[in-house]
Image: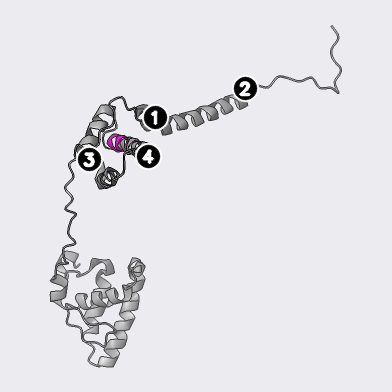
Amino acid sequence: MEYNTEREKIVISEYGRNIQVMIRHLMEIEDRKQRTEAAYFIVNVMAQMNPQVKESNDYMHKLWDHLYIISEYKLDVDSPYPAPTPEMQKKKPEHVGYQKNNIRYGHYGQYIYDVVKKVKEMEDGPKKQAILINIANQMKRDYLNWNRDTVNDLLILDDLYKISGEEIALPMETKLIPTNEILNKPQNQQQNQKKKQNNKKKNNNQPQAKQNNPNRPNKKN
């Protein structure tokens, strides 16, 4: 009995050992035309064994790359795609970079900072005041998403003041959306719907009053 630990290591495990054996045999075919035809056949078998690779647009290119990789880049056939090299596989992808927006209050997000910056350019008036209250309400929602407990409205107003560079100050008596409404409104709706369903079930399960059969004469006392 031969154990797997004693066999040749599988290069790409998704295709299994049989595909690797087929590719090793492929490399022993001397006629280039026959070798190329056999390579196309093996690629089709690989596509059937690993169907999820078809989800990508260039899946055939990937299959041929895998064929070369399993052959340890020694395969010599007429491939429809350029043969990969070990250097290409070892090459690291370029760094995509990270955003360099260092914001102090990350739980509000960059969007709040951008909106506050735009509102600062508006003229003072009822429209600007209404927008600022909407921003403060959104900040309260964001805060409660980050910390689902409670928050004082004065804290939100103070954070808005700091985010605006100490240029925007809503009155301290400003009333924002109640915390209970933000946290419990969906839950209350579900509870009310569940309560209605339970009441409906109770009404259906209650015994109905017995009705006299009109075709049957009543008993005389």
Q: Say what amino acid the circle numbered 3 marks.
A: Ser
Vertical side of 103 occupied by 41: above or below: below
Label 1: few (<14), some (14–19) or many (≥20) C-alpha neighbours in 10 Å: few
Of the image marks 2 and 3, the number of the one nearer the N terminus: 3
User: What residue sits right under mark 1 in the picture?
Assistant: 181
Residue 164 tag number? 3
Residue at x 31% of width, y 87% of height: 37
| Number of other residues with Cα within 10 Å of mark 4, as a class: few under 14, some 14 to 19, many 20 or more | few
Answer yes or no: is residue 84 visible: yes
Question: Which residue is rendered at x = 24% and y = 71% of the image?
Answer: 17
Amino acid identity at mark 1: Glu
Q: What residue type is labelled 4?
A: Lys
Residue 52 x/y as whole percent: 34, 66
How far, Cα to Cα, is label 4 from label 3?
Answer: 17 Å
Q: In front of the other: label 4 or label 1?
A: 4
Q: Which residues lie in the magenta part?
A: 137-144
Q: Which of marks 1 and 2 is nearer the N terminus?
A: 1
Residue placed at 28% from the left, 47% from the top?
A: 118
Q: Position of residue 129 (x, y in %)?
A: 34, 36
Q: Mark 2 points at which residue?
A: 206
Spatial separation of the CA atoms under disc 1 and disc 2: 36 Å
Q: Which of marks 4 and 3 is in front?
A: 4
Q: Does the magenta stretch include residue 139?
A: yes
With 13 as the anchor, is 53 left or right in this view? right
Q: What element carries label 4?
A: helix
What SS does tag 3 mark? loop
| Structural distance between the alpha carbons of marks 2 and 4 | 57 Å
